[in-house]
Image (spheres, rainbow, N blue to C red):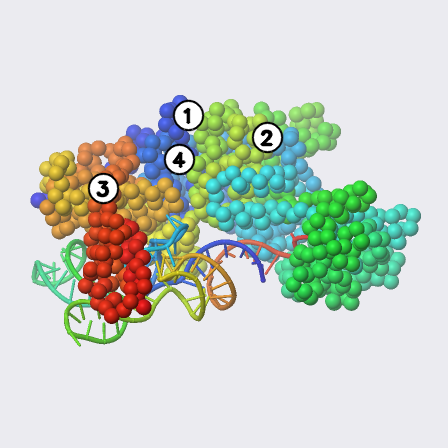
Amino acid sequence: MAEHRYDPHEIEPRWQKVWADEHTWEVSNEDDPRPKSYVLEMLPYPSGEPHIGHLKVYSVGDAVAHFHRRSGHRVLHPMGYDAFGLPAENHAIRTGQHPRASTAEAIAEFQRQFRAWGISIDWTREFATHEPRYYRWTQWIFLQLFNAGLAYRKEAAVKWCPNDQTVLANEQVIDGHCERCGAEVEVRQLEQWFFRITDYADRLLDDLAAIEWPEHVKIMQRNWIGRSEGAEVTFRCEDADPAHAIDYPVFTTRPDTLFGATFFVMAPEHPDVLRLAAGTEHEQAVRDYVNHVAAESVEARGDTDRPKTGVPLGRTVTNPVNGERLPMYVADYVLMEYGTGAIMAVPGHDERDHAFAEAYGLPIRRVVSDPAGGDLPYPGDGPLVHSHPDFDGLHNREALRRIVDWLDREGKGHGSVNYRLRDWLVSRQRYWGCPIPILYCDRCGMVPVPEDQLPVELPDVQDYKPKGRSPLAAAEAWVNTTCPECGGPARRETDTMDTFVDSAWYFMRYCDAGNDAAAWDPAALARWMPVDQYIGGVEHAILHLLYARFFTKALADLGHLPEGIQEPFARLFTQGMITKDGAKMSKSKGNVVSPAAIVERYGSDTARAYILFIGPPDQDADWSDDGVEGMFRFLSRLWRTCAEAAEELPADPPPDNLNPDDTRVMRKAHWAIDKVTSDMAGRFAFNTAIAAVMELLNELTPAKRGAAAPGTIRFGLSTAASLLFPFAPHTAADAYQRLTGERVWEEPWPAADAAYLETDTFELVCQVNGKVRDRIEAPTGASEDELRQLALAQPNVRAHIDGLDVAKVVVVPGKLVNVVVR
RNA sequence: GCCCGGGUGGCGGAAUCUGGUCAGACGCGAUGGCCUCAAAAGCCAUUGGCCUUCGGGCCGUGUGGGUUCGAGUCCCACCCCGGGUACCA
């Protein structure tokens, strides 16, 4: 008997070569009778080498891709690199190495490892977002948005990261700190490029209903968009300038409480604040307050718990519903960025207004009664009181509608919707990004670069250091060009695009990656879009996923997508983090597990299968070196058992007449097929799927086989290999071929035979007062009465009911009998 | 504060959707044994706690209540951990 030793370093390259030589995972855009499936993992940012999170996401994605293929789908499973971005640029600043060079090195390392992992990628569609053949089309999309008025420039107060020396999108500011480097963010007034994502707020919200995403991700997107329904109500100020009354609209979600307004508050950044206070006794105090607020950190101001502060403006506005004069204040709890930068304050029914009124001795009035009779402030619902005879007594929700109607008729307000979402700030004052294809001509103004002059290639520069303006501004020869409209001198836009722009459309490019004439042929998108299964980290729940959805909708509206494509990702799976010793892996903690080291030691199948076995893939999981060892033992045992069986057992089919051991093995095999299939098709329960294959193998060890026929054993083992293929493809393919001579990836996914899933007897649980006292084999078709008799006859049941009254007997057919005694 | 997750053996986890099989699959670790000159590898057995006359008994899924013949699973209240978010009018 030959000694069989599991050697992944021999097995894995051998099968990888077959797949590469035969282009096994490549798919064409030609017609194909099979249904399509587009399986995509979020593209990696190539920096250094792949980490354990990459191993997890591509192990999950590859399992799904293999399962879909063998379930009869034609699967698109591509790979690319999100190659622009700050880390490479900062590296360049430190070392002088061009970002292109360090990026190329990182990409080469990623490619090497991805191939060593045996991920089933169609490499013909590979690209990186920093390649001109890709960003040419990023620029083209920018121009489409620009021409449609969806890309625009405006001066605005923007969040500025003093460390990265660049502006940030709202979404990139976390708790007042830069999402990337953690530096405290400042506010600056600058002219910047924006995408009009707010135009799509409602559709981005509504269409969440149409996609199969985890509920918590949908909730995060909903909260981020932050839609509020209410009314805009106009308050008039007449005493600041008697000749010219000024109207100040406010947004409120509670127009039903208008009669409870007792003061009016403006944000310190409101442009009229200083003008309003001018000439009053409060002028100096207002000036001091506004300056004081401006000097405060974003952090300090964001603290909801600190006491409310503000100062009077010395002016009043008129409440449009009752003509009352309300004193005006400036206070930092009112934000300029939301609504109109001014609010009506209703201290009786709003906690913040209440806190301010308490602090400054302002009147507090109840206008909605609380059915529970609680104290003010009362933010809940109830009948209106102390408002107006027309509305008093009405439920406040009904009163709200009528008051808005009345405001509308009187021209004093109207129903309105407000969003928390703001436009996407896309310009960055950085080098390593996609150039914005816009020119500035003294005669013609802002001119888009003609499409036939794309790409606007990123020039080389000597100095990458940020100086508050883009490093590109130093590339004079590049900046100075001619205007395509008048032929006169023009200057190029020197800002580059946020890298989230690059990744907001890459999934479409994969469908037609080689196209030199267009970003894509709509027919290619019709073939593959939307992505059927998108897989990635939950950290992109708002940024990337919202931007990709916006791009898809905008491009669909502009007629660039085939009919019916409104969402990029039909199904989303968010995987959990891999930690080590309960903590996030990081170089500073020294707890980094390198995928390359694991693969080198145990082979990629062990690494991949272990990471899927460690726990539910959507949850965080802690890496264990001992656990990896266990997976290696399992794969060794499976492979060795298969190799030995292939050599020693005659290649018979399963026998027609099954002995009890045959039946046991066949049942277990079909049970495993059923289990793995449902674990793959429903939730991605790879951990229990792999456990089922382990159970099947445990039935097939030489010691446990008993009198099972060789054909039965071969069937059981080849089924185990077949089911394991999505998780450990090399080992499974090798074992399967030894047993059957066939290529497992060309085999259809096995189907469970229902006849083996049913049994003619079952284990009847016999309980007394809910405690299990016995278990017996009972015929599957037995009647309730038969089961009752059977249970009552069991000695241990009788021992526990002896001398007691049987109050009742509960019979659950197919499961149990419970005897209730007193 | 609010919104999502989640608390089960020494550890990762299973069963939770649809209440029903002495809860604990599968794996790790541990203990004992076989094999070996020895080791590695492999194989076998045991492994929630306590008690036991070895038949079995009692207790156990964060805490306290409740519903039910029966609760890890459903309901109410609370505690703890993780993530998101933050004066959004």
Q: CA distance from mark 4 to mark 2?
A: 27 Å
Q: Which chain does the residue under circle 1 lie in? A: A
Can the viewer see residue A783 in this picture? Answer: yes
Q: Which residue is mark 4?
A: A77
The kind of residue tagged 4 is: His
The kind of residue tagged 3 is: Tyr
Q: Which mark is residue A29?
A: 1
**N-terminal label among 1 and 4:** 1
Query: Judging from the image, what secondary structure is the residue with disc 3 in?
Result: helix
Q: Are marks 4 and 2 on the same chain?
A: yes
**N-terminal label among 4 and 3:** 4
Q: Which residue is mark 3?
A: A756
Can the viewer see residue A717 in this picture? Answer: no
Q: CA distance from mark 2 to mark 1?
A: 24 Å
Q: Which residue occupies 34% across, 31% down?
A: A72
Q: Nearer the viewer, mark 2 or mark 1?
A: 2
Give the image location of residue A486, x and y in percent: 70, 24
- Label 1: how many Cα within 10 Å (few below 14, some 14–19, many 20+): few
Q: Which residue is mark 2?
A: A557
